[in-house]
Amino acid sequence: MPKMKTHKASKTRIRITPTGKIMRTQCGVRHLLTHRSPKRLRNLRKKTTTTTAGYVRRARFALVKGQP
C-alpha cells in the first residue's frame, strides 16, 4: 500500500502546535473592512487556535501527522 500524501493546501493554511492544537488565520480581513472597528481588525490579524475535535481530527489526517 502506498504512503499517504499530505494535503498541500492544508499544509499552507494550518499548523499543528507541539501540544496538538491547530493554528490558523482567522477569516474576515479581506474586504468590507470599513464598518469594522480598529480593535476588531487588530484582533482578526492574529492567529487563532482551534480545538474542535472533528476539525482537529480532519486536519491531522490531512497533514498526515498522528494518523487516527
Image (cartoon, rainbow, N blue to C red):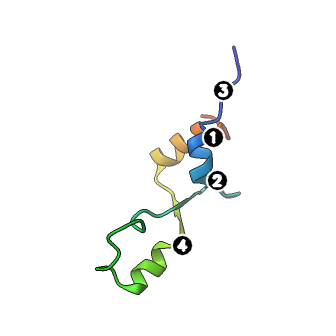
Q: Residues within 10 Å of mark 2 (few under 14, many from 20)?
A: some
Q: Which mark is residue 30?
A: none
Look at the numbered disc 2 and give the secondary structure of its residue.
Answer: strand
Residue 18 lies in what quarter of the image?
A: bottom right
Relative to 5, say whether 22 is above or below.
below
Question: Mark 3 highlights which residue?
Answer: 4
Precedes in sequence: disc 4 or disc 1: 4
Question: Mark 1 highlights which residue?
Answer: 63
Q: Please state which amino acid type lies under the numbered disc 3.
A: Met
Precedes in sequence: disc 2 or disc 1: 2
State the quadrant of the N terminus: top right
State the quadrant of the C terminus: top right
Look at the numbered disc 1 and give the secondary structure of its residue.
Answer: helix
Q: Is residue 60 left or right of residue 37?
A: right
Question: Mark 4 highlights which residue?
Answer: 46
- Between the C-alphas of marks 1 and 3, the distance is 9 Å
Q: Residues within 10 Å of mark 1 (few under 14, many from 20)?
A: many
Q: Is residue 6 left or right of residue 26?
A: right
Q: Are marks 4 and 2 in contact (CB under 8 Å)?
A: no
Residue 27 lies in what quarter of the image?
A: bottom left
Question: Mark 2 highlights which residue?
Answer: 16
Q: Is residue 55 left or right of residue 3?
A: left
Q: Please state which amino acid type lies under the numbered disc 1.
A: Leu
